């Protein structure tokens, strides 16, 4: 097998009169080969470049399509023609221990083209192979023996133990850094340590100062019921980082808030839970680039690379004397290499998944590098509504529409409405749609279905309106069709501020908390009539403890009642207060007894 040791690089140094031997020519080939392999491994990694699809021809045979791959040692593997094999004839089939196998491709070299050599007479070998042919080899191995693809770097994830006992351990892991406003995955891993362990039930609430859960709150409820995995199981939850950096953010849970039962018996968490996961100004791309490129060359060399490329997972039905190919799967097994040559095709195919700005496909391609123009006020909306007219509707009667949401949101909105009708248009030579805004009596030559005086009531804070119509003449129409148009008007700066603050407030869910000296607590806030926003925290007096930008308060070493002011960063007028009653631990224990 070819050596995987690539470094250090060493090449020939030529000079006049140098005697060249076969070792020098081999060194020349080795230098170029190792340099190419090194670049392949560092720049492209391992995986499939093109082709190499695996298909089942019948219950016993497979076909591998032609293609190219690069293994973990940076060596190219080219399958120039499709290969058809009986699965039982593939290397490794006889040693399979399970019914789930992985078909792999490996580079193989063989010496070919024997030629006569004079030097071989001294050793009794008169022939030497003149060429080395680069080929390939298919083999099978059990699915369980295949290592996972691209495990994350240890520094990329932050983890902490939520519960540790004799029967089970529960750990949480998530990215150590998250970009402002980005989503991050929290994985909860339950590992069973004893075979005789009963089912596990765990309930707790994780305080997430710098993150929000799926409901927009800062408390993530975790509830695991009657779990009894064979080895371990993983649950996933999603958190969203706040829009402002939080360099000291942690996820918290007090030990007494972690309720655990194993086989119906209550267990106690020995320690509280604290997982450090910060929010940074760097975007997700920067965080990923740092994580991917953080490993040193020594670590990469120590980890080593696989000398094969997985192609497909094959599920078998095996009996004592026979087997059947049940299914061939590639998801989760194949790893692909993105090459510059495939970039144009990838971009063309991505159009079918990526939502582009309005317009034709050609326009979208032309504007793809141009920033999207933001829509500025005023904003327009229009629609059709029908006001029902009862059988007793006579002149002077008033009819009302239902409440209509114009879709422009709360704010100052102008809405106008008028009857819409169809009439022959001589210029167009066909029937045309017309709408009359204002006094319809000024157009007697083409009266609308019903002449009516129209007024609109706009509920600015609710983002809706109601249309009233008073008939100016008797009508036999069942409904009055109207076309409405809404325009969002820009208001004054002060008026907008007041409008934005109206009815909005924040409140601390637990405004008063009793805690020990030097202990920590997170003040969770409820948002009333407003979306969650970035909060600022400050202590109203000196030497009253410490509080981070995430709202994690650490009590001082003295007793007392200390006040914390919490306000919205964007609207400081929206604020509330929380109070910490700090006592020494001895006093707390006496109070509990």
Image (cartoon, rainbow, N blue to C red):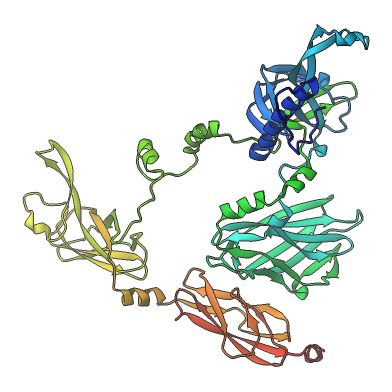
For image coordinates 67% across by 16% down, the residue present is 81
Q: Is residue 585 above or below residue 163?
A: below
Q: Nearer the viewer, residue 177 or 587?
A: 177
Between residues 593 and 273, which one lies in front from this camera angle?
Answer: 273
Considering the image in quadrants, where does the N terminus appear? top right
In the figure, is residue 136 to the left or right of 394? Answer: right
Q: Give the residue displayed 60% in from the left and 73% down from the top.
A: 550
Report x, y in % for residue 158. 71, 60
- Determine the residue positioned at 79% across, 20% down: 22
Q: Is residue 331 visible?
A: no
The answer to which quarter of the image holds residue 272 is: bottom right
| Location of residue 264 (image quadrant) | bottom right
Q: Is residue 37 left or right of residue 210?
A: right
Q: Is residue 337 visible?
A: yes
Q: Is residue 376 above or below residue 117?
A: below
On the image, the x and y values in percent for residue 88 come to: 83, 20
416 over 326 or under it: above or below: below
Q: Whole-percent x and y of residue 421?
A: 18, 48
Place of residue 188 in the rendered image (x, y in percent of width and height, measured from the top left): 73, 58
Callout count: 0
* Residue nearest the observer in this picture, 196 or 94: 94
Q: Nearer the viewer, residue 537 or 284?
A: 284
- The image quarter containing residue 154 is bottom right
Above or below, comparing residue 514 to residue 398 in the picture: below
Decide if residue 529 is on the left or right side of residue 93: left
Please state, as top left, top right, bottom left or bottom right, where the C terminus lies in the image. bottom right
Residue lying furthest front in this view?
17
């Amino acid at each position: 097998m070819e050596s995987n040791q690539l470094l250090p690089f060493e090449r020939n140094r030529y000079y006049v009169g140098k005697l060249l031997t076969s070792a020098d020519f081999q060194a020349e080939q080795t230098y170029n080969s190792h340099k190419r392999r090194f670049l392949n491994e560092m720049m492209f990694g391992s995986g499939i470049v093109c082709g190499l699809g695996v298909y089942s021809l019948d219950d016993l045979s497979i076909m591998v399509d032609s293609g190219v791959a690069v293994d973990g040692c940076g060596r190219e593997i080219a399958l120039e023609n499709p290969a058809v094999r009986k699965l039982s004839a593939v290397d490794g089939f006889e040693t399979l221990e399970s019914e789930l196998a992985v078909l792999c491709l490996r580079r193989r070299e063989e010496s070919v083209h024997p030629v006569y050599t004079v030097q071989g007479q001294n050793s009794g070998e008169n022939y030497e192979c003149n060429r080395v042919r680069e080929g390939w080899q298919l083999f099978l191995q059990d699915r369980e023996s295949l290592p996972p693809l691209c495990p994350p770097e240890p520094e990329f994830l932050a983890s902490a133990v939520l519960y540790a006992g004799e029967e089970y351990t529960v750990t949480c892991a998530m990215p150590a850094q998250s970009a402002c406003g980005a989503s991050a995955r929290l994985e909860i891993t339950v590992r069973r340590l004893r075979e005789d362990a009963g089912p596990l039930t765990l309930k707790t609430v994780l305080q997430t100062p710098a993150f929000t859960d799926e409901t927009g709150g800062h408390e993530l409820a975790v509830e695991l019921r009657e779990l009894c995995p064979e080895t371990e199981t993983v649950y996933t939850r999603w958190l969203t980082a706040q829009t402002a950096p939080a360099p000291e953010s942690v996820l918290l849970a007090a030990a007494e808030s972690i309720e655990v039962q194993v086989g119906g018996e209550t267990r106690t968490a020995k320690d509280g839970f604290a997982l450090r996961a910060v929010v940074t100004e760097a975007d997700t791309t920067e965080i990923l680039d740092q994580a991917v490129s953080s490993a040193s060359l020594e670590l990469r060399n120590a980890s080593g690379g696989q000398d094969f490329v997985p192609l497909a997972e094959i599920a078998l039905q095996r009996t004592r004397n026979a087997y059947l190919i049940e299914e061939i799967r590639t998801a989760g097994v194949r790893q692909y290499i993105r090459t510059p040559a495939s970039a144009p095709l990838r971009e063309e195919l991505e159009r079918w998944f990526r939502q582009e700005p309005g317009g034709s496909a050609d326009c979208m391609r032309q504007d793809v590098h141009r920033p999207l123009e933001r829509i500025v006020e005023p904003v327009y909306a229009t629609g059709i509504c029908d006001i029902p007219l009862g059988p007793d509707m006579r002149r002077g009667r008033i009819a009302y529409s239902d409440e209509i949401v114009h879709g422009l949101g709360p704010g100052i909105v102008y809405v106008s409405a008028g009857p819409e009708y169809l009439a022959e248009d001589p210029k167009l030579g066909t029937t045309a749609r017309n709408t009359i805004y204002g006094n319809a009596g000024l157009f007697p030559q083409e009266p609308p279905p019903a002449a009516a005086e129209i007024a609109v009531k706009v509920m600015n804070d609710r983002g809706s309106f109601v249309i009233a119509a008073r008939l100016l003449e008797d009508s036999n129409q069942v409904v009055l069709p109207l076309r409405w148009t809404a325009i969002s008007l820009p208001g004054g700066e002060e008026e907008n501020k007041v409008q934005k603050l109206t009815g909005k407030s924040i409140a601390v869910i637990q405004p008063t908390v009793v805690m020990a000296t030097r202990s920590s607590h997170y003040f969770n806030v409820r948002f009333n009539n407003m979306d969650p926003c970035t909060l600022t925290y400050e202590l109203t007096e000196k030497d009253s403890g410490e509080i981070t930008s995430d709202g994690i308060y650490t009590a001082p070493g003295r007793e007392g009642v200390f006040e914390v002011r919490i306000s919205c960063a964007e609207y400081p007028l929206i604020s509330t207060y929380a109070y910490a009653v700090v006592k020494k631990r001895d006093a707390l224990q006496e109070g509990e007894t």
